[in-house]
Amino acid sequence: MGARHGKIGIQKYAKRQNLLVTRFGLNRELYYFPYSRGASTLTEWVIVTLYGRGSRRR
């Protein structure tokens, strides 16, 4: 078959990649659109807890 259509030719254009599969993760990311009201509230709470409200903090 030659170098172009054989094993070496295919490997030249293929790149090996890793795939991570977790059994205990979420079904989807928390911050992906569309947001639910609960996800928005939780995300806001985490941001305020970690970083505060900035100059509006009283």
Image (cartoon, rainbow, N blue to C red):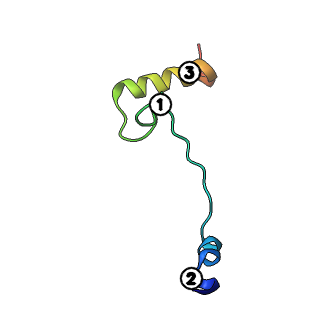
Using the numbered discs, state the Cα–Cα distance from disc 1 to disc 3 in whole angstroms: 30 Å
Q: Position of residue 54 (x, y in %)?
A: 62, 24
Residue assigned mark 1: 23
Which type of secondary structure does the marked residue at label 1 adopt?
loop
Q: Amino acid at mark 1?
A: Arg
Distance (Cα) linking label 2 and label 3: 57 Å
Amino acid, disc 3: Val
Q: Are marks 1 and 3 in contact (CB under 8 Å)?
A: no
- Identity of the residue drawn at 35% across and 40% down: 34
Question: Mark 2 vs mark 1: which is more N-terminal?
Answer: 2
How far apart marks 2 and 1 lie (CA) works out to 39 Å
Query: If you read the primary sequence from the N terminus, does the residue marked by circle 2 or circle 3 appear first?
Result: 2
Q: Label 2 crowding class (10 Å Cα cut-off): few <14, some 14-19, many 20+?
A: few
- Residue 10 place in picture, x, y as percent: 59, 74
User: Left or right: 39 with respect to 22?
Assistant: left
Give the residue number, with chain letter if any, for mark 2.
Answer: 5
Point out the image quarter for the C terminus.
Answer: top right
Q: Label 3, on which residue?
A: 48
